């Protein structure tokens, strides 16, 4: 198959395949296989509908009263296929190291909590009614899920659910009758299992696909999602217990910011804001002079080092504030400056939290 060679039995198309499918650009037999999968996978079907809606609005915006430019379809499909190539990272840490660092910091934070702090409520709106203990169970559940998908399941963890919400609910119900140290121990063991496995595979295999997000996802993306989520929830715990928030190391933050830039078109699509053919440059003034990326707003994953494209607007802001905005968390100072199309810049920054969820 063009994007993933074939759809594996019991597996499913990648996000890239769904983007191409939404553009009706697969061969008939490939399209039939994807359609059959979508009939059995509601989460993937929702993503395909969102991508198809976005693609339609991109085309309408490009030429509201005429056919789209002759090369528009080829450009978008080509960029979607190119999205298999990992987003560029300039002098940033490896996803393996970013994942290890953030999981280790979370384990140390949880191990430092006092008995009374485990029952403190947390404040993000998606966590209504959750305590610090519930957050710990959630993080441990997702890390053990990644271990499962990597073929190194954690002994003693009974949850079999393969989705974020279902596995979290089951893990939380079990952990509410257990002392907090059990959640810390499971998280530590799961993080070690994942880290040992990915180190054994090595950097050269980070583009291999694992099951994540309702379908095959590049291992490097899964590791960064886990690191990003863990850092975000560690700060949730810090706020709940009166501790100061902590930024990732600069090299980790550079990697995380670069990867998040590739999802900016998806953030806009969720907000039903579409700017096909427009290009935005993000420059992160706290991460060094090379921390700048150009984003094609018509292509999910269409990000490259700054300087290769003519941009419609350049947004300068803190990389830390950018990542906290993506996770829909308090940023303290989230001011930005923009040159060029200021309205476009404002729309992009406003959409950054669009995919923040449990």
Image (spheres, rainbow, N blue to C red):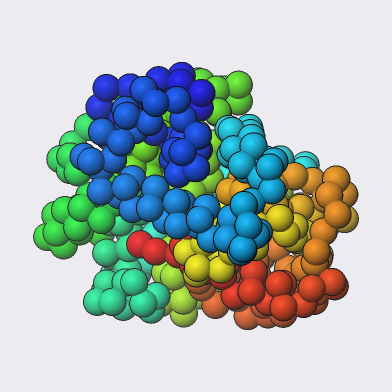
Query: In this rendering, would 326 be left or right of 40?
Result: right
**Picture coordinates of residue 64, whole percent (x, y):** 61, 64
Task: Give the side of residue 106 with respect to residue 139, left or right.
Answer: right
Instruction: Classify residue 33 as left or right of residue 275.
Output: left
Q: Is residue 279 in sight in this rendering?
A: yes
Q: Is residue 317 left or right of residue 8?
A: right
Q: Quadrant of residue 28?
A: top left
Q: Residue at x 24, y 76 (%)?
A: 129
Write the residue at 30% across / 36% down. Answer: 35
Residue 352 percent coordinates (x, y): 57, 67
Which image quarter: residue 213? top left
Q: Position of residue 84 (x, y in %)?
A: 58, 32
At 56% from the left and 68% from the top, the residue drawn is: 273
Question: Vertically, is 65 above or below 170?
Answer: below
In front: 91, or 316?
316
Quadrant that contains the C terminus: bottom left
Residue at the far front in the pictured view = 66
Vertical comparison of 135 with 201: above or below: below
Q: Nearer the viewer, residue 188 or 46?
A: 46
In percent of width and height, residue 303 lies at: 70, 47
In the figure, residue 351 lies in which quadrant?
bottom right
Q: Which residue is pictured at 83% across the width and 49% down the height?
A: 309
140 and 338: which is toward the camera: 338
């Amino acid at each position: 198959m063009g994007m993933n060679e074939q759809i594996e039995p019991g597996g499913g198309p990648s996000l890239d395949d769904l983007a191409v499918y939404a553009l009706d650009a697969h061969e008939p037999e490939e399209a039939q296989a994807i359609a059959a999968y979508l009939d059995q996978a509601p989460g993937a079907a929702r993503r395909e509908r969102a991508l198809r809606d976005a693609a339609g609005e991109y085309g309408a915006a490009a030429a509201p009263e005429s056919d789209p430019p002759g090369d528009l379809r080829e450009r978008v499909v080509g960029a979607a296929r190119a999205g298999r190539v990992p987003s560029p990272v300039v002098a940033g840490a490896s996803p393996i190291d970013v994942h290890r660092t953030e999981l280790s910091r979370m384990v140390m934070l949880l191990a430092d909590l006092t008995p009374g702090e485990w029952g403190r409520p947390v404040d993000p709106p998606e966590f209504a009614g959750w305590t610090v203990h519930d957050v710990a169970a959630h993080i441990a559940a997702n890390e053990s899920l990644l271990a499962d998908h990597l073929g190194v399941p954690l002994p003693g963890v009974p949850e079999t659910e393969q989705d974020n919400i279902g596995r979290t609910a089951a893990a939380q119900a079990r952990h509410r009758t257990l002392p907090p140290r059990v959640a810390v121990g499971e998280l530590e063991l799961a993080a070690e299992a994942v880290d040992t496995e990915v180190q054994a595979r090595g950097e050269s295999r980070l583009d291999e696909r694992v099951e994540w997000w309702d379908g095959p996802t590049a291992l490097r993306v899964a590791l960064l999602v886990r690191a990003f989520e863990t850092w975000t929830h560690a700060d949730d715990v810090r706020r709940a217990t009166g501790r100061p928030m902590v930024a990732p190391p600069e090299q980790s933050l550079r990697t995380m910011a670069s990867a998040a830039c590739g999802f900016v078109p998806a953030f806009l699509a969720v907000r039903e804001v579409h700017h096909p053919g427009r290009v935005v440059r993000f420059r992160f003034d706290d991460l060094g002079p090379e921390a700048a990326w150009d984003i094609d707003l018509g292509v999910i994953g269409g990000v490259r080092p700054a300087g290769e494209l003519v941009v419609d607007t350049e947004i300068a802001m803190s990389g830390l504030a950018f990542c906290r905005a993506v996770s829909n968390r308090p940023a303290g100072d989230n001011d930005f400056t923009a040159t060029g199309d200021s309205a476009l810049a404002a729309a992009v920054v406003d959409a950054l939290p669009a995919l923040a969820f449990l």
